[in-house]
Image (cartoon, rainbow, N blue to C red):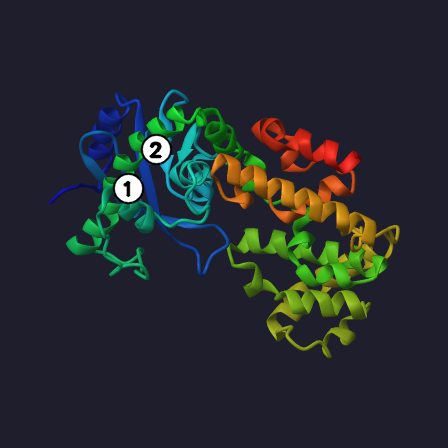
Amino acid sequence: MSYVLIEDEEELVACCNELATQPWVAIDTEFMREKTYYPELCLLQIAGAGQIYCIDTLALQDTSTLRDLLDQRELIKVFHAARQDLEVLHFLCGMPPAPVFDTQIAAALLGYDDQLGYAALVEAITGTVLPKAHQRTDWSRRPLPNDQLEYAADDVRYLRELYPVLFEQLQQKERLAWAMEDNARLTDVALYEIDPDQAYLRVKQGRTLPARQQRVLRELAAWRERLAKQRNLPRNWVAKDGLLIYLAQTCPIRLDQLDEVRGLSDAMRKQQGEALLAAIETGLHREALPLFDAAGPLTPEQTVRRDRLLEHLKARADEIEIRPQVLGARREVDAIVRGNDNSILLQGWRRQVVGEELLELNQG
């Protein structure tokens, strides 16, 4: 076998001691979350320059040694498309591991597609074509067959080949600082801890509601978020978005009115009816101010300016040979046109490369 399977704490200690001597490690995770609020880590693949380890986290009672390894700030953790992996490890460790190096971010800054998948990047750089046999595997089932573990090991086997190549190319193009700046954003705890009072922002139809009903929706979404966390259930298993919208529109104030609400189960009505009504009442007593961005469409004059700024952004992206969306999406240009200083185009390396120019064009 080309990997070592870790299934007990003694093996884990030896594995982590060896990896702690490395300057960087390649990491991938296999997890399940179809039936839970919190992702359940089933397998963690990790490798430095030497041995590949597949750590069966479901077989371990104590993962503190692994958490200590991931918490080492001098150890660079290499991922591809790191966002989901970091979310999983955030719940394991209490915070996302840092520092990180995301090969998808690195590739985008070198001119590749900004959404390039792992297999495509491996093929582009190494020429190796990876199998797709286990993409829909249930990683919580035990025992894990050898071919499945080999497939999992491939996710770090080639990742550790990508890292030095991309690192060197970033240095040659003097873009390593750009990559590390973008990577640092991935370790912001706020990305992975959802404040129940901000959960309404996930309900896309909410912005179509009047201000008073938006306030009710905010309380209902907070109720759902807290209950989903408490019961470790997917949000939509607690209540679908459509149900929250309907309750915010109709604002029932008595238990018997909940009997007429479609999509609300008898069990949920009995167990959470009072809590639902309390959330609605709280929302109704809030000041009726809109919660969602009410900026509306750009004016004709703003649209002309936006289009001019987009043309300049594209020309600048072509000049430095990266995709325009790597610099910034259209909404980020819209933000500049509206006078919003929070646009990512006005931060860090993007401000130096194109942001200042866009500000001048906008003001001119």
Residue of label 1:
125
Count neighbours of disc 2 (C-alpha within 10 A) and say few if under 14, some if 14 to 19, many if 20 or more.
some
What residue appears at the point 72 percent right and 66 percent down from the top-left corner?
A: 245
Look at the numbered discs 1 and 2 and tell me whether their residues touch, using CB distance below 8 Å.
Answer: yes
Q: Position of residue 201 (x, y in %)?
A: 68, 52
Which residue is painted at 47% across and 28% down in the image? 180
Q: Amino acid at mark 1?
A: Ile
Q: Secondary structure at mark 2?
A: helix
Q: Position of residue 353 (x, y in %)?
A: 58, 29
Q: Amino acid at mark 2?
A: Leu
Residue at mark 2 = 166
Give the mark nearer the N terminus: 1 vs 2. Answer: 1
Please tell me which residue lies in front, 41 or 341: 341
- Quadrant where the C terminus sits is top right
Q: How many marks?
A: 2
Disc 1 secondary structure class = helix
